[in-house]
Amino acid sequence: MNVQDVKDILGIDHTDDDNYIKATLPLAIGFVKEYCKNDFLIDGKEVLGAVQLPIAKIIEFNRHEAGVQSEGISKVSTSFSQDIPLSILQMLEPFKKSKMRFY
């Protein structure tokens, strides 16, 4: 997965966000691998295939949605959220591998 893949998925047709996407793409991929407990390797080659959409959505969320969750004008209060939305996490559910523990 590369910057152009993310841009194609999200319908981005400018270069304004290229550096941001380039910097955050490995972080989003790392998050997905850790969350799913899945390295997405087939015959030693990384195959992200069906998780490309959630990866792109994580990047989009962090770029445009993360941060201010709600604001109050009267007393100027702001709350922040850095949690990935449930809708994105649900896209990853089919790819989660359980870790078995033997005691």
Image: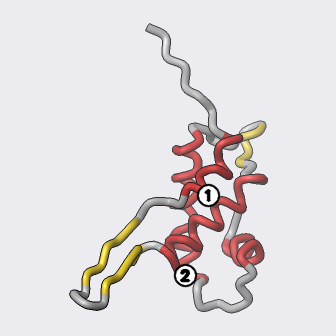
Within 10 Å of disc 2 (Cα), the crowding (few <14, some 14-19, many 20+) is: few
Q: Nearer the viewer, residue 42 or 29?
A: 29
Residue 2 placed where, x, y %? 69, 68
Would you identify the image quadrant in which residue 86 lies? bottom right
Residue placed under numbered mark 2 in the picture:
19
Tell me how far mark 1 sits from mark 2, CA to CA: 23 Å
Secondary structure under tag 1 reads helix
With 24 as the anchor, is 5 left or right in this view? right
Would you identify the image quadrant in which residue 71 lies? bottom left
Residue placed under numbered mark 1 in the picture:
88
Q: Which one is in front in this view, the residue at disc 1 or the one at disc 2?
A: 1
Chain-order first, disc 1 or disc 2: 2
With 29 as the anchor, is 94 left or right in this view? right
Q: Is residue 51 above or below residue 100?
A: below
Q: Is residue 5 above or below residue 1?
A: below
Q: Which residue lies at the image location 63% right of the left edge and 50% below the top edge?
A: 90
Q: Is residue 97 above or below residue 60?
A: above
